[in-house]
């Protein structure tokens, strides 16, 4: 069974969202210097790399990461290729065959280099999010840093996701994954009170 690793690598070279906390690693104990083992500590934003947004990230009354329904992050998923466009529009998603689709992943190809933060990436129109929820979709993933444009201050798409009960995966790496149906596994960590969590996301052929 073929497995696609759709997780962005995380290192000190990984570009964070501007103003967010980059990845940092410090060695606390090393065998090379006489320690009994190697132990490090890391600092990073939970939004760095491939991650699951918790609803609390965009609404004070939203659930935090440890309250996530893990069933959302395991199960059948549809990967859809998106042509070059600034937004995944309502008109685009209305053309998709979504019968039985609960997890929908958008491959836009608009944020290709994890070492460079690209501001000109494809986001999702709020009305598209509302439509998807009405079709039974519960989780939407995208290969960009955000479902909103990089310069958005009102986070209209995030707010539409909250109102619709949709959940979000961001910064997926879908290059090389043919469009189609797969099994998604992308579990968030049990981070109590957190606004997001890194995930190790994979797709398995059904």
Image: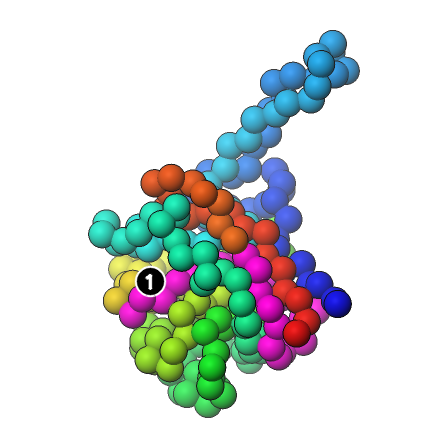
Q: Residue at x 32, y 76 (%)?
A: 130
The residue tagged with tag 1: helix, strand or loop? helix
Q: Nearer the viewer, residue 161 or 147?
A: 161
Q: Is 144 one of the magenta-colored residues?
A: no
Q: Quadrant of residue 92?
A: bottom left
Classify mark 1: residues with Cα within 10 Å, few (<14), some (14-19) or many (20+).
many
How does the figure colour the protein chain or chains?
rainbow
Q: Position of residue 144 (x, y in %)?
A: 51, 62
23 vs 65, left or right, is right
17 vs 164, left or right, is right
Q: Position of residue 151 (x, y in %)?
A: 37, 58
User: In the figure, 39 relative to 168: above or below?
Assistant: above
Q: Residue at x 52, y 53 (%)?
A: 187
Q: Position of residue 155 (x, y in %)?
A: 31, 60
Q: How many marks?
A: 1
Q: Quadrant of the N terminus?
A: bottom right
Does residue 47 appear in this view?
A: yes
Q: Residue at x 49, y 50 (%)?
A: 188
User: In the figure, 3 relative to 65: above or below?
Assistant: below
Farthest left residue in view: 61
Q: Quadrant of residue 123?
A: bottom left
Q: Nearer the viewer, residue 19 or 155?
A: 155
169 vs 56, left or right, is right
Does residue 121 appear in this view?
A: no
Read off the residue under disc 1. 158
Q: Is 169 one of the magenta-colored residues?
A: yes
Q: Bounds of the magenta span?
A: 164-186
Q: Residue at x 33, y 80 (%)?
A: 134
Q: Quadrant of the C terminus?
A: bottom right
């Amino acid at each position: 069974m073929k497995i696609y690793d759709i997780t962005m690598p995380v290192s000190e070279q990984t570009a964070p969202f501007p103003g967010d906390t980059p990845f940092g690693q410090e060695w606390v104990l090393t065998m090379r210097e006489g320690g009994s083992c190697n132990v490090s500590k890391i600092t990073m934003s939970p939004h760095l790399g491939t991650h699951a947004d918790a609803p609390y990230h965009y609404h004070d009354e939203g659930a935090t990461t440890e309250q996530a329904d893990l069933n959302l992050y395991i199960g059948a998923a549809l990967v859809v290729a998106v042509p070059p466009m600034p937004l995944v529009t309502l008109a685009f998603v209305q053309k998709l065959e979504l019968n039985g689709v609960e997890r929908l992943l958008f491959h836009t190809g608009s944020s290709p280099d994890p070492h460079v933060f690209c501001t000109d990436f494809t986001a999702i129109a709020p009305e598209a999010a509302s439509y998807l929820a009405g079709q039974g979709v519960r989780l939407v993933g995208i290969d960009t840093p955000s479902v909103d444009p990089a310069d958005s201050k009102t986070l209209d798409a995030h707010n539409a996701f909250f109102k619709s009960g949709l959940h979000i995966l961001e910064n997926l790496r879908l290059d090389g994954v043919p469009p189609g149906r797969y099994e998604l596994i992308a579990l968030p960590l049990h981070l109590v009170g957190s606004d997001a969590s890194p995930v190790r996301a994979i797709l398995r052929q059904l």
